[in-house]
Image (spheres, grey):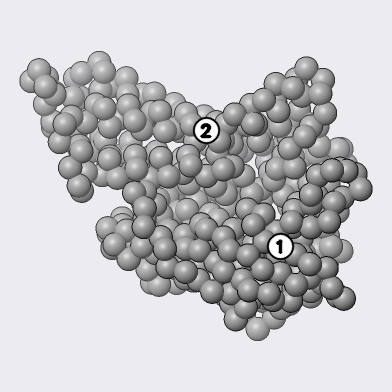
Amino acid sequence: MPDKTQISPAQLLRNAIELQPLFRKRRAETRELRRVPNESIAELKQAGLFKTMQPARFGGYQMNPKYFYDAVVEIARACPSTGWVLSVVGVHNWQLGLLDEQAQRDVWGDDNDVLISSSYAPKGVATAVDGGFNFSGQWQFSSGSDHAEWVFVGGLMPEDDRFPGTPQIGSFLIPRCDYEVIDDWHTTGLQGSGSKSIKVSDVFVPNYRVHTFMQGFTGDNPGATVNTAPIYKLPFGQVFIRAVSTPSIGAAQGALDAYCEYNAKRLNSVGQQVVDSPAGQLAAARAQSEIRTARLKIHHAYDTLLGNIAAGDAFADRDRVEFRYDSCHSVESLVSVVQELLANSGGSAIYNGNQVNEYYQDMLAFRQHAANQTYAPAINLGAVMFGAPLQDMFC
């Protein structure tokens, strides 16, 4: 591979594609381990994929997020669990760039390959003390936690004056020595993501290692003083939401790949070759169209938002809520087409080891993430279309 300090988006994508055979080969092992194998994490690092949105000051490429998510699609196409971990861990390298410079030095001062996991649900309790917070809590779903030396975990904070009556939510950055990883990850999908629980018991978190959702929403981020590239002006929600939806695009493409291979010579229940069956052909065509649509919407979103930044324009509320809805709706749409692929793969597809079925189970796991639920974003989009103010801090 070429010198990573000079990497281009095209080379980054080629690096991801070159890893696909290895990750396909390890897919079963990844599920059995219930975490991504160490060698896969090492290969993702060597390919430069975790550093796509990391600040250049710490060895990163600070690229347009669309290039990161293009790579995520290709990794998830080969192994959904590995693609998921790349996506949700890799986005933290961008978020850390939003925090105070000292927080960045704490994590990357000695090793800029250090990774961060997360669980943003506001289950932590923060008590303000001199210089920071005493903090405790327990969280599920910290994907890739076996490979991380730090974690972002969510907690409630005092109210923001701009939103009276609404508790403020913060991300608290905590080192491995101050938290426990609980091995409780036993699931029917994304088994290899290692999304274990995190427990924190009365630790001190300095103010500079806290990032509030409100800062991420308004762009009032402490890291902006040192990280001035356009991507650090993007709203937190507009980058984070794609981290939990984009792997489904790759998994859907992997399911379509497996469907075409599995059904190439298979006969359906009436003795017709599936490749000659209108139902089988239609399932493939619908899946391909939804996959392509989802990918194009990611590029459109970031081209629009970064175009606003380049022009010095404010982000339009309508764009923010529409892009938020697009993100979760893509997962819902892709689950439907992958289910159709499974339905056209015959009764034998329910057996263990059928790849279409395995991808489908991972798709269902993607959909269960809170940020991939469509109801609230759809209601918010509809309200904004009728003139109501934007209410979602993940937009």
65 lies left or right of 83: right
**Residue name at image x 64 percent, y 31 percent:** 376
**Up-down: is 68 above or below 276?**
below
Residue 326 appears left or right of 168 = left
Q: Answer yes or no: do the residues labelled 2 and 1 have beta carbons within 8 Å?
A: no
At x 82% / y 20%, what residue is drawn? Answer: 387
Query: Cα distance, mark 2 to mark 1?
Result: 34 Å
Crowding at mark 1 (Cα within 10 Å: few <14, some 14-19, many 20+)? some
Q: Secondary structure at mark 1?
A: strand
Residue 81: give x, y in percent of width and height: 41, 54
The answer to whether residue 190 shows anywhere in this view is yes
Q: In the rendered image, is residue 115 in sight? A: no
Picture disc at residue 18: none
Task: Tally the marks.
Answer: 2
Q: Going by the picture, which residue comes out furthest to the bottom?
A: 110
Indicate whether 329 appears above or below 100: above
- The picture quadrant where one finds residue 150 is bottom right
The quarter of the picture where the C terminus appears is top right
Q: Which residue is mark 2?
A: 330
Q: Which residue is mark 1?
A: 125
Q: Nearer the viewer, mark 2 or mark 1?
A: 1
Q: Amino acid at mark 2?
A: Ser
SS class of the residue under badge 2?
helix
Q: Residues within 10 Å of mark 2 (few under 14, many from 20)?
A: many
Who is closer to the viewer here, 190 or 46? 190
Closer to us: 221 or 165: 165
The residue drawn where x is 20% and y is 38% is: 350
Q: Amino acid at mark 1?
A: Val
